[in-house]
Image (cartoon, helix red, strand yellow):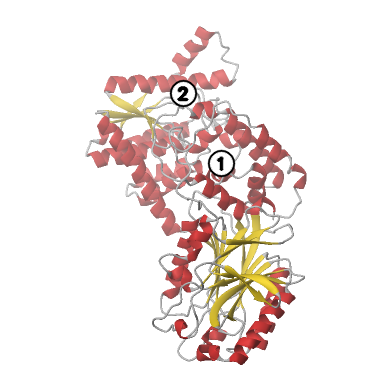
Amino acid sequence: MKHGFVKVAAATPDIRVADVAFNKEQICQMIDEAVSNGAKVVVFPELCITGYTCGDLFTQEALLAHAREALFEIAAHTKEKDALIFVGAPLSVEGELYNVAAAMNRGRILGLVTKTFLPNYGEFYEMRQFREGPEIARRIRLLDEWIPFGPQIIFEAKNMENLVVAAEICEDVWSPVPPSIQAAREGATVIVNCSASDETIGKDVYRESLIGGQSARLIAGYIYANAGEGESTTDLVFGGHNMIAENGTILAVSKRFENGIIYSELDVNRLASERRKNTTFKMSDGRSLIRTVFEIELTPTRLTRRFDSRPFVPDEETERTKRCEEILTIQAMGLKKRLMHANAKSAVVGISGGLDSTLALLVTAKAFDALGLDRKQILAVTMPCFGTTDRTYNNACKMSLSLGAELREVPIKDAVTQHFKDIGHDPEDHSVAYENSQARERTQVIMDIANEKGGLVIGTGDMSELALGWATYNGDHMSMYGVNASVPKTLVRHLVRYYADTTKDEELKAVLYDVLDTPVSPELLPPKDGKIAQKTEDLVGPYELHDFFLYYFLRFGYAPSKIYRIARYAFDGEYEDAVIYQWLRTFCRRFFSQQFKRSCLPDGPKVGTVALSPRGDWRMPSDACAASWMRDLEAVKPEISEVI
């Protein structure tokens, strides 16, 4: 349960309608199974002790008496179980019958949550047998114990700060104002739902949308346990459609019409972090709900939920295509506005034959098309120097001409060599001054050309480079509008590939594919045997790792130790633990030390939820110290073999 992960389960047992003894045994068996698999919160369907479809049998004393007896027997069965367990049951209280979700822990019934909204339409007629729960929870006496009873009760883990659970029952979540809203506003990070929702055509799609949407609205985990095929009788069929969701994402879903248990891990620390950042998520001013404490041991949680190793890139091809087109459009529309506002007569792009400048040129062409301007007003400038290879030079030239831009070549070797003389730098000293002199000369060239042409310099640097500070200050770091500023390197590649896949220009297609196949490099050191000698990922690490680190660091505020843990899981079989650890240290060190470059970034369009603009998404002191983050990471170094 380290890092806020808690394993949860939604269970649908085999039942027989009105056979309480049989149902009790099935529920107890599933409790054993779920707990043995590490589940700390286990949820069963609505009225599963008796079956939801008992109809007027709910008025029979024999059924109700056996149900109450079974409720306490199931609770007793949980005495040695390290979990909070919710079981649906009918309960007669003070002469009225209620539909409740009984919360059990360590042999005790901690609370009896009543159903607030009783459906009485279509195939449902609950108001014939049941009463709506009271408006305010109270305590009732059952077997010499005073137990919280009412519409909402908050269950707080004694020794896990952010694990706070509340329950609602089936129709409650379908109502205009679900009880879970108030529960979340009073601190519940996990909502459970004991449900009996029958199957009709298309209902499963809506049900998933509803549960996913509610978890997003509440910034909560949501465990939905639905009645299964044992309930099917007369006119109704139930499919056991169980779901586990977290903040809008369905983490696990059952196969319908097959009873069983689904598991996943909720990250309650992440949920708490998301709520802290969301200023529109308003906590309740008062604490009106009854609160009770449950106990669980803090044990290791083996992760089974999926962590995408490329979180910026959709897995599914259709979604990836849609994402690429949307991002290209956002980039182009942002640039279109800047060109219009500045009354720019041209756009100047420094072209290297690499991925970033390729994307910037493609976006610029798209913006010019949207403005109805001739692409010949785009000036693509190639500036060969000491590290330029024939491959990248030729690709830059071919691409520029294929797109209809004006191509200009400005060799900078002589200018940089003169600069070395001016500052007394030995050209054989291939240090950072050797490299940065070239980058700054290129920036000076295109800035001056832009002035000459009445145009704007279009920046090419991407978000991954900005995160690592892999840019020359006042060199490629600077532009008049940075179209790639919030696009991570892993996504840059897919955007260029999407353009290549969809263009009808076969020559351009071939060039773009070759750009995609070219190693990422600033080409600031002389080539070896005509090939690129300076490969960025050999120096700073694989961008797919850094983009993963960046996503979880910025999007969720994860500590480095937690990022390391999930990276080991996500990249299992791709990178060794030591390699992940090494580059995560590099990421933390560089991210903090290079903030001063991000503090003065040019404007650029925001395309996703993770961005580094100092004006909007990331306001960080330029001189903030990384010590706390490095210590956090250092603490997990000996844990290489620890359970994932």
Looking at the picture, tell me which residue is in the foreground, 110 or 495.
110
Looking at the picture, tell me which residue is in the foreground, 8 or 259.
8
Instruction: Provide the secondary structure element on which disc 2 rests.
Output: loop
**Vertical side of 347 occupied by 216: above or below:** below
> Three-letter amino acid code at disc 1?
Tyr
Mark 2–mark 1 Cα distance, whole angstroms, equals 21 Å
Number of marks present in the image shown: 2
- Give the crowd class for mark 2: few <14, some 14-19, many >=20 residues within 10 Å: some
Looking at the picture, tell me which residue is in the foreground, 462 or 287.
287
Q: In this rendering, would 623 be left or right of 160?
A: left
Q: Residue, x 32% and y 50% (percent of image)?
A: 504
The quadrant holding residue 229 is bottom right
Which residue is identified by label 1?
543
Rendering coords of residue 47 (x, y %): 57, 80
- Give the crowd class for mark 1: few <14, some 14-19, many >=20 residues within 10 Å: some
Q: Residue, x 27% and y 23% (percent of image)?
A: 454
Which residue is identified by label 2?
475
Q: Residue, x 47% and y 62% (percent of image)?
A: 214
Rendering coords of residue 365 (x, y %): 31, 39
Tell me which label, 2 or 1, sits earlier in the chain. Answer: 2
Rendering coords of residue 69 (x, y %): 68, 84
The quadrant holding residue 149 is bottom right
Rendering coords of residue 414 (x, y %): 45, 14
- Whether residue 227 can be seen here: no
> Three-letter amino acid code at disc 2?
Gly
Q: Which mark is residue 224?
A: none
